Image: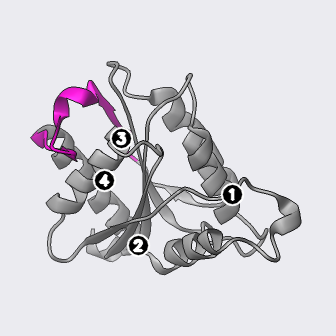
Amino acid sequence: MRLFGLAGSLRRESYSMAILRGLQARLGPDRSLAIGDIGMPLYNEDEEEDCHAAVTALRREIAASDGLVLATPEYNHGVPGPLKNALDWASRPYGASSLTGKPVLVISCSPAFTGGVRAHAQLNETLLSAHAMPVPGPQAVIGGVAGKIDQGRLVERASLDFLVEGIERMAAMRHPAAA
């Protein structure tokens, strides 16, 4: 299973990136997680036909993956602008989106105990409107994330186990008979 991940923060040492790195290291040999970049120009419908190379690469990576993993912080009770922007680009052109039918595991995090639940809810709304398929089941929310990171990687076992369970639910969406 080839997964593609996006961290919702542009910060070099972001908790979102640390979560993806921790998950990447924890996956078994039959699962891989490539991590992409959300740094791209602001979405502009006028530029859909002749879009930036970063946008084309993002769409290609999402389309080629078996599932998308989004790790996001919560900024002012919502999704960070750069992540929303990347998803807006990926959702286009209408009717040919790389997100259509794509299983997506959403992971939210925060230093607060709430773990970014409001951003999590907003991402699910965006994904549903883009015809993606958020992974059903318990939400992957990591509160108190700062204490669960070591050397730029999520290391807290309970959180990693829970995220791997989310990946297994995603795999079951792709291959229901294997579940």
125 or 51: nearer the viewer: 51
- Badge 2 local density, few (<14 within 10 Å), some, or many (20+)? some
Q: Mark 1 points at which residue?
A: 41
Q: Distance between the residues labelled 1 and 3?
A: 20 Å
Q: Which of marks 1 and 2 is in front?
A: 1
Q: Distance between the residues labelled 2 and 4?
A: 21 Å
Identify the residue shown where x is 56% and y is 70%.
Answer: 58
For mark 4, give the secondary structure: helix
Q: In this view, does 93 lie above or below 128?
A: below
The kind of residue tagged 2 is Arg
**Earlier-in-chain disc, 4 versus 3:** 3
Q: Residues within 10 Å of mark 3 (few under 14, many from 20)?
A: some
Q: Going 18% across and 33% down the picture, which residue do you hit?
A: 148
Left or right placement of residue 100 versus residue 177 in this view? right
Is 100 situated left or right of 112 in this image?
right
Residue 47 to residue 30: above or below:
above
Give left or right: position of 85 versus 20. Answer: right
Residue 174 is tagged as 2
**Is residue 111 placed above or below 122 in the rendered structure?**
above
Report how far apart the C-alphas of labels 1 and 2 lie in the structure.
32 Å
Kind of residue at badge 1: Pro
Q: How many labels does the image show?
A: 4
Give percent across and percent down for residue 75.
53, 28
Q: Position of residue 88 (x, y in %)?
A: 69, 55
Q: Earlier in the sequence, mark 4 or mark 1?
A: 4
Q: Judge whether residue 142 is colored magenta.
A: yes
Quarter of the figure that contains the C terminus? bottom left
Marks 4 and 3, Cα distance to the nearest angstrom?
10 Å
Q: Mark 3 points at which residue?
A: 14
Q: What stretch is highlighted in magenta?
A: 137-157
| Spatial CA span between label 2 and label 3 | 30 Å
